[in-house]
Structure formats: structure tokens, C-alpha cells
Amino acid sequence: MKINWYPGHMAKTERMMEANIKQVDAIVELLDARIPRASRNPQLDELVGGRPRLIALNRSDLADGEATKQWVDYYKTLGSQVIVLDCKSGQGTNQFSGAVRRLLADKIAARTARGQVGRPVRIMIVGVPNVGKSSLINRVAGGIRAKVENRPGVTRGKQWIRVGDGVELLDTPGILWPKIEDEQTGLLLAFTGAIGSNALDEETLAYHLMIMLKERYPQALLARYKLDVSGIDDVDLLEALARKRGMLASGGIPDLERAVNLIITEFRNGLLGRMTLEDVGCGDFDAPCEDKEDAI
């Protein structure tokens, strides 16, 4: 499976990032804590060069807390600075300015020594669509400065936003990469809503999501839907969900369309519980797992 969901504004975003990278002091790479590897853009290293980078794991309220701790430790072993956020509630966002200043401590000290006191540090916020970049900016800025919507592709142009404490943020539109050739990565991005709904048939998406939940969180399906998936074949999972929830069309036929919408919506909204869909243990970002099924 190859997903080629790359709207025209993403190519424009990539050019905009390249044009503005010399104006920024550091990069904040916002990741989805549920999919900390899949939500990393493999082109980012080339785009941002060697600038200091802070990894921010957002949507921590939807992710498995123990798994998030493991991912934090993992990225720290790679030498990265990491913070954990829930931009929806604001939890963890008070760490942001301090983390940025620690990241740029040497540069700030050098500027102070040259008499450039008060010169703001400039940060570029990057991430895949719908990962919460604008929500982060609004939280640290103390008000609604950037447009927020629960769908990819809302932010279309750059925005410089002063957030106090001598920090300016550049909000950028979410950017994917032209061809997502790894099937697992594409599915994970689609599960969490980073890829538009027109990129992949939703029944196919729900089918794969049910399989993953059966493997990783069967108790969540039992608790939410009273659905014991242990003895159900993968191909019958959606039908079993529809029957369990009484979603039947005329003649008692399972209404798969309603079941598809139910499982995708409730997963994305966290109604099934806190879940992380990737495990640590397959090498760093530049050396992905040879056997993805062992990691996902």
C-alpha cells in the first residue's frame, strides 16, 4: 500500500521552511505520543540541517502513559531533549519556554556577552498535519493566536507569534512527505487523522484498526463494547462490532458503515482508553525496524 496524499500546500510549505530556516535558532518537532516514530517526517533532517531540536510528544492524554515514558527515555538516549504535552488541557505546556531556553543556553549566553540583551530566540514549530501545532502555540502564547481545527490542512501560511519571555514562534502548516511507502506508517498516520479521509478507504482503515486493537488492546474492546475478540477472525471484526452495538440494516444485515465510523471516531477521541500503537526497541529514527510487525 502506498499513500500519495500530498496536497499542493504541502509542497509550498516545504519551500517556505527552506526559505525561513536561516531565520530560526531551533526547531520544535511536535510528535503524536500515540505514534512517536510514524509521526516523524523522514525529510526533516535534510530540511532543518543541524539546528538544535526539541522533541515534544503531544496528545499524551490519549497515549499509554508507561509507553510514553519509554519513548521519552528512548529519545533521550539518542541525545534529544524531550518534553511531554497535552495541548488540549495545557498540561506540560508550562515546560515549553524553559526547555527552549535550555536548548539554546549557549546561544543566549553568547548574545548576552555581545550586548544583545532582549533579542528574542526564534523557533520553528514543525510536525505532521493535525498533530496540534497551533494548539501548542495558543497555549504558550496565552490566547488564541493560531487557527485550530480537528482536521489536517487548516494552517496554510506561516505565522510569527511572540509568546513572551523573549521567544518567537513560527507556526507552519503540517507537512507529510510525497510518498508514504511503508504500509504500517501510512496506517498509523491515517488512524490518528494526520492523513485526510480521502486518501484511504475508511472501511479498509477501520478493518486494520480493529486488527491492531485486537492484538494490542483487546481488553479495551471488551470494556467499551462488551466485544470479546479472542475467538473472532480478523475479517469478521467489523461485522461483530456492528452486531454487538445493534447496528443492523434491513434484514438484520450488519451496517458496516456505522461500525466503521464508530471505531475510527471513538479511537481518535480517546473513548477506548489511552493507547500507544508503536513500541520502542527497533533502533533510531534513521535506522528503522527491519521487521515492522515486531515493533507495531
Image (spheres, grey):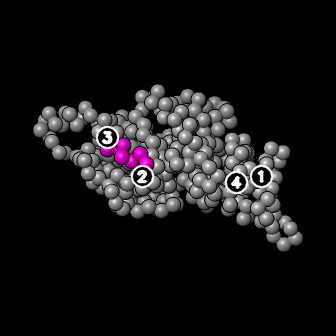
Local SS, label 1:
loop
Residue at the location (59% across, 29% down)?
A: 281
Tell me residue 110's x, y (percent). Answer: 19, 33
Mark 3: give few (<14), some (14-19) or many (20+) Cα within 10 Å: few
* Circles 4 and 1 in contact, beta carbons < 8 Å: yes
* Circles 2 and 1 in contact, beta carbons < 8 Å: no
Residue at the location (69% across, 48% down)?
A: 220
Q: Is residue 273 visible?
A: yes
Name the amino acid, label 4.
Arg
Name the amino acid, label 2.
Gly
Could you give the CA–CA distance between mark 4 and mark 2, rounded to whole angstroms? Answer: 27 Å
The magenta span reads 91-98
Local SS, label 2:
loop
Tell me residue 22's x, y (percent). Answer: 29, 43
Q: Residue furthest bottom?
A: 250
In the drawing, what numbered circle is on residue 90? 2
Determine which residue is flagged by label 3.
98
Local SS, label 3:
helix
Name the amino acid, label 3.
Gly
Could you give the CA–CA distance between mark 3 and mark 2, rounded to whole angstroms? Answer: 15 Å
